[in-house]
Image (cartoon, rainbow, N blue to C red):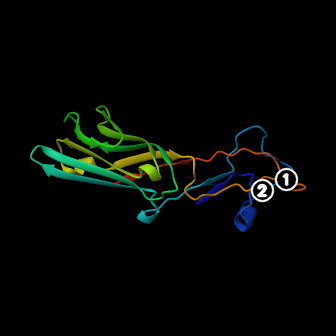
Amino acid sequence: MSTTHPNVDKKLFTSDSVIGLKNPEKSFPLNNDVGVLKWRLQSTDEALIPLTINCWPSESATGCDVNIEYELQEESLELNDVVIAIPIPAGVGAPVVGDVDGEYKHDSRRNVLEWSLPVIDAKNKSGSLEFSVTGQPNDFFPVNVSFVSKRNYCDIQVAKVTHVEGDAPVKFSLETSFLVDKYEIL
């Protein structure tokens, strides 16, 4: 789903994939950042997930052994500041972490184990975290995931910017960001 700025001609965008002003007499402010297009994907189709997460808690004599894995599905993406947050039961203390790719932090105030990975890309497309803690298998859900990327999931590009009158090229800057609004594994 895409949303355009209120001053953008929605019909022109829909028919020609061109972002143009509804009223050419008005302009966007110069030297200010203005978001003119927002695109959002909301789906339960797992084939569209750029990063898969598998969480496998199994009961043991002392509680649960948990193995959690990630795998980048869209290898052209570079995900930055990835945080995979796994709930930990309240009052059981810190989990005992075994093998880990990346870093982890136990936040006892929020009862969560945060697994942090600075970059997930084609060179670092999979990894795992193993830990043990007192609890039941359902205690470790929902797992929440967050990340940012400088490359769009849909690979939309700005080809050029021109004046409304005369089609003369205009210098422009572009900032692309792809971020997670809500990504839960239930």
Q: Residues within 10 Å of mark 1 (few under 14, many from 20)?
A: some
Pick whichever, 12 or 148, lies toward us. 148
Q: Return the mark for residue 24.
A: 1
Image mark for residue 124? none
Q: Horizontally, is 50 left or right of 111 in the view?
A: right
- Decide: is 174 above or below 155: above
User: Which image quadrant for residue 86?
Assistant: top left
Q: Secondary structure at mark 2?
A: loop
Residue 170: x and y, percent?
82, 48
* Mark 2 residue crowding within 10 angstroms, few (<14) / some (14–19) / many (20+): many
Q: Quadrant of residue 104?
A: top left
- Is 123 placed above or below 1 here? above
Give the residue pinned by disc 2.
Answer: 20
Q: Residue at x 20, y 34 (%)?
A: 91
Residue closest to the far right: 166
Q: Amino acid at mark 2?
A: Gly
**What residue is shown at x 87% (from left), y 53% (from top)?**
168
**In the image, farthest residue toward the front:** 123
Q: Is residue 88 visible?
A: no
What is the secondary structure assignment of the residue under circle 1? loop
Q: Is 113 drawn above or below residue 123 in the view shown?
A: above
Q: Position of residue 1 (x, y in %)?
A: 58, 60
Find the distance from the CA under tag 1 to the CA under tag 2.
8 Å
Determine the residue positioned at 73% across, 38% down: 32
Q: Is residue 119 visible?
A: yes
Tell me, yes or no, whether the two marked residues, 1 and 2, touch with CB atoms within 8 Å: yes
Report the side of 91 relative to 152 (left or right): left
Three-letter amino acid code of the residue under disc 1: Pro
| Foreground label between 1 and 2 | 2
Q: How many marks?
A: 2
Q: Left or right: 87 with respect to 151?
A: left
